[in-house]
Amino acid sequence: MSNKEKIDLQILGKVRHLIPNNFIIERIKKHELQKNTGLVKTIQLRSSKRFTLEQNDKYDEFCDVLDSFTFGNDLEVIKQFDNFKETIKPKLMKGSTFGTINGVENIDLNTFQTKKGCFRTLQDKTNLIVFWSSLVPKSIRALQQLNELLKQNKDLKLQINPIAISLDGDFNNLKSYLRDNQIKEFEHYRFTFGWDSSNEFQKALELNYLPKIVVVGKDNYVVDVTTKSNKIEDIINTYIKTGESVQESEEIHQQKDIIEKETYKQIKQTLIQTIANQLSQNIKLEQSDFIKLNLIKSHKISHDGNQELIERSQLNIVYDISVQSEQVIIQFLNEIKTQLGNNNIHIQKQLIKDPNGIVKKISDAFQDALKQNNKVIQDYTIKTETFNYVNEKGVFQQDVQLINKKGIFNLKFQEYQTIYSQVQPIFKKYQEEIEESDEEHDHESEQQQDRNLINNNINQLTDTLRSGLQLTVGQRFQTIQNYHKFGNDQQIQIEHKENQILIIFYWNDNKDSDRLFPTIIKFLLANEDSFKDNVRFVALSQHKFDHYQHYFLKNEGIEEVIDFYFPIEENQTDLIQYNVNTFPHFVIIDKIGNIRLQSRQIEDLESLIEHQLEEGLDNLKQLVNLNEEQYNQITQFLQSDASVNLGQFNNKRQFSMNFIFIEFQCGENKTRLSPIINYTIRDGKQKYVETYLKLLNKVYSLIQFQVNKTTQKTLNFLFPGKACKLCQNELNEQTPQYYSPFIDEFYCVKCAEVFDTKAIGNNKLRVKDNLIFFNAPLVDKSVLNDIDVNRLGNNLKVKKGDPYSQRHAIDCNGCDNEIRGFRYIVLNCLPGKLTDMALVDFCQDCFNQIRQGGTHLEKIVKRTSMYGYNPSMLLLRIPFYMGYYEY
């Protein structure tokens, strides 16, 4: 006996008294050969019984004592005992006492109220208990199939007690699923804390792998445990007919083969020296084929350490292979039979699968659906040419993007729905078939390859079908379906009306979306009267309503200003239609129903819409596709010296322009949409670009362009104020003072700088608005003019209950220290478009130096000279940090 063998028997002898006497311990020596792992020799310890849940403390004591040993510092022996602990730990299985489930709550499907408590099986009925989660598709399918079984088979339902117990940690997710799906044949519970790795019951039933379906008999013994919903009817019917109590399985008691010692040695020698090489060198087998051969010798270990031989096996063979490998495995088995003889081989399990055949059936069904609807898959190209004006060079620079696609060109949503409704059941059938094909987990990687082959094929076909839906700028808007409005479950469509601009805002409860809402609310309220039937704004949510309940409680009243809509299903096809890859995402449709813009962000939505409202309906209807000659004329103009007229716009923050040409090519057919002009111009400087556009109009009529114009709005301030709004003290040109542009009121320094350190949130401030500071007397009065409106922000306040801080996570441009206290934004520096880190900020200390003057101020001016700062410039005071641009 080797040292390794001595170690495991020695340790077992020391802990055997902690294991109940009726547990039979088996020591198994196994030689196992697999195609992908080669030949492995192992020694295993296995128990015929497990500790019960009620004996969990004794199991823990057994484990603690076992863990105190060093195992001779042998990793294989350590692994051997880790596996032994798994075979003996409490586990609910066939024949176990089911017991009571604690830490669950009952769910009322009418009110979705919950009642905490415990669950016990009914003693006078057969209990069907499904453990599932709304986040695990396989478990959802099992629950739905069993629900349908009970709905169709009322006699069966009368004989059983159907229970569904969810492991959803998020109750909102579970509620959303149960509300949308009629799972009414079951009584519903959930574990209050979802999956909990410390929950002994969950560990005993291995609920980290779902679904688990348990049938419990009238005597509270487990009849069976399975993951297969299609087995349940037979399990229940068999139990009801026999009415027999179920005993826990003890495989060790079963009679096992004991072949001759010399025969066993010969099989082992042949396995090691010959068969292992034959399998490893067989290159004809598919990668997903699974083949396992093992040879077993086992002894029963008594309490005193004596060993009794209970098995010396034949060569056991299990295989799960593709139909393409059928002849290969037959040849391989024949070679083994020739070497060992038929009597020394035992085929334990054999399965021939045909994943490639399933792929062909799926593809054929897809093609049949296309043929029925007179559709074909085509290769086509979308070419987007963008000519961007480069301020530094004074020229337009071309950028070309080619997207090669395979799909149904110009597929309509209704056509997509028709085709998808025909193929989706077929996709689902084969996906479920491959998911349910085998319950064994010893060759999960090989099974996963089969699943991947089929799922990848389905995903590819689905993507091909969906790709034809994608719309681009210049194409016609298609109605968006399957949404419901906030506070109303009725399904509606998002449609476009002629002569109305439709703004679609795809959002989620993330920071990027959240920071846009104050601007959107201000935009909608400011234009409420002028928009009426002319502009419609809708916010389409990424997820279902239940996902956002907390958001709307926190932002109460936001739904009164913005029309929110929620999808009926997750990941709906309109996300593909309108290229929604990230949130937020804007889609703007003009008066005649053309998509004018698809973008993650818009510089100034109000300005853009104002200009589109000015467009005449008749002019828009004259838009036509561009022919080759017209395209050449325009692009030649862009490369001409006409662009010198734009030369005075040397600031890319205050002027940008691009021309976009979109062309579709399918086979020999080419279509180039009407050209697009996007440009941003600073307020008051439109005359400089008009000269250029007039020259362009002579080449190709401007009426034929889709023009998206944004004006950077500016304002001028009147200074000084006459008196402080609060104390009525006089203000003049020599008096430093504060001003609120949001209510048009001035304040003296004394009133504006009152700050109560003991108060909470905005109550710390006597004046709660974000205020502009005038560092009077103003040496340079030009700072009062040409102020960007968007620099003023949204006058955000700390919401009740929200955290707040005066640490602004921003470095001061005057001293490089982190800004603490008040943040002061210079309103005159870097005028124009807000790009990344486009603000100049000062901390409280630098603000004090600016007011006092002197050598410190000179250093600040020097440090900020690259931004053009001077001490007369206006400073916007921000009390609390909410984000770089959130104030």
Image: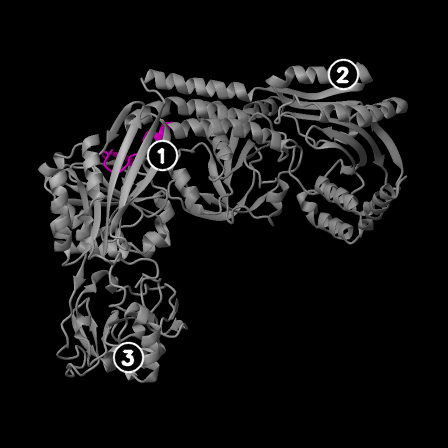
- Residue 480 colored in magenta in the image: yes
Eye-nearest disc, 2 or 3: 2
| Residue type, numbered disc 1 | Ile
* Residue in the image at 24% along x and 82% along y: 750
Query: What is the C-alpha distance between the residues marked 1 and 3?
Result: 60 Å
The dot on residue 754 is 3
Give the magenta part as a residue range. Answer: 465-482
Residue 796 lies left or right of residue 307; in this view the side is left
The x and y percentages for residue 146 are 49, 28
- N-terminal of the pair, mark 2 or mark 1, is 2
Q: Which residue is mark 1?
A: 403
Question: Residue 800 occupies which quadrant of the picture?
Answer: bottom left
Residue 42: percent from the left, percent from the top? 78, 36
Q: Is residue 90 visible?
A: yes
Number of the label disc, if any, that sits on residue 335: 2
Residue 325 within the magenta-colored segment of the rendering: no
Q: Where does the image place residue 375, in percent across and percent down from the top left?
A: 32, 20
Residue sitting nearer the eye, 140 or 869: 869
- Residues 214 and 569: in front is 569
Left or right: where does residue 99 sit relative to residue 494? right
Callout 3 secondary element: loop
